[in-house]
């Protein structure tokens, strides 16, 4: 959207003034393959993300995985 990136924190939204910004990843956090993290998101320390997780909001400490369902179409 070509707008400066803002970061949402418990204290409120902080305007970074940056046109581009990665994310904040806490210490001892582990990310699986093909994880997508939207700009300005915060991943708390000691967080584990499984493969193909999309981080759309800030994540508190925990373990996250993507649930995938395989459906037979009968073909």
Image: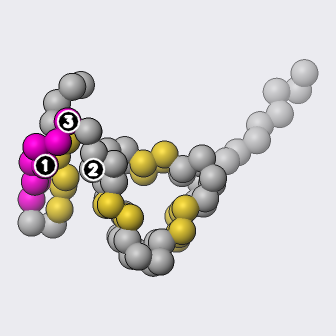
Q: Is residue 66 left or right of residue 8?
A: right
Measuring 10% from the left and 54% from the top, which residue is drawn there? 14
| Quarter in which the C terminus is drawn | top right
The majority secondary structure of the magenta stretch comes to: strand
Circle 3 residue: 19
Q: Is residue 33 left or right of residue 74?
A: left
> Would residue 15 be counted in the magenta stretch?
yes
Determine the image quadrant of residue 69.
top right
Compared with 66, 11 (above or below) is below
Label 2: how many Cα within 10 Å (few below 14, some 14–19, many 20+): many
Structural distance between the alpha carbons of marks 1 and 2: 9 Å
Compared with 50, 15 (above or below) is above
Residues under numbered marks 1 and 2 in contact, where contact means CB atoms less than 8 Å apart: yes
Query: Could you say whether the residue bearing mark 3 is in a helix, strand or loop?
Result: loop
Q: Percent from the top left, x then y, of residue 46?
A: 45, 78
Structural distance between the alpha carbons of marks 1 and 3: 8 Å
Determine the image quadrant of residue 51.
bottom right
Measuring 38% from the left and 64% from the top, which residue is drawn there? 25
Over which residues does the magenta segment extend? Answer: 12-19
Measuring 27% from the left and 50% from the top, which residue is drawn there? 40
Q: Percent from the top left, x then y, of residue 67?
A: 62, 53
**Which residue reaches farthest top?**
75
Structural distance between the alpha carbons of marks 2 and 3: 11 Å
Q: Is residue 31 visible?
A: yes
Circle 1 residue: 16
Circle 2 residue: 40
| Quarter in which the N terminus is drawn | top left
Measuring 88% from the left and 26% from the top, which residue is drawn there? 74
Query: Could you say whether the residue bearing mark 1 is in a helix, strand or loop?
Result: strand
Q: Is residue 33 left or right of residue 53?
A: right
């Amino acid at each position: 959207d070509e707008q400066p990136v803002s970061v949402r924190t418990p204290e409120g939204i902080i305007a970074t003034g940056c046109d581009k910004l990665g994310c904040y990843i806490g210490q001892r956090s582990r990310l699986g393959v093909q994880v997508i993290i939207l700009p300005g998101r915060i991943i708390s320390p000691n967080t584990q993300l499984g493969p193909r997780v999309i981080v759309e909001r800030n994540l508190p400490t925990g373990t996250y995985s993507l649930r995938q369902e395989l459906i037979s179409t009968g073909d």
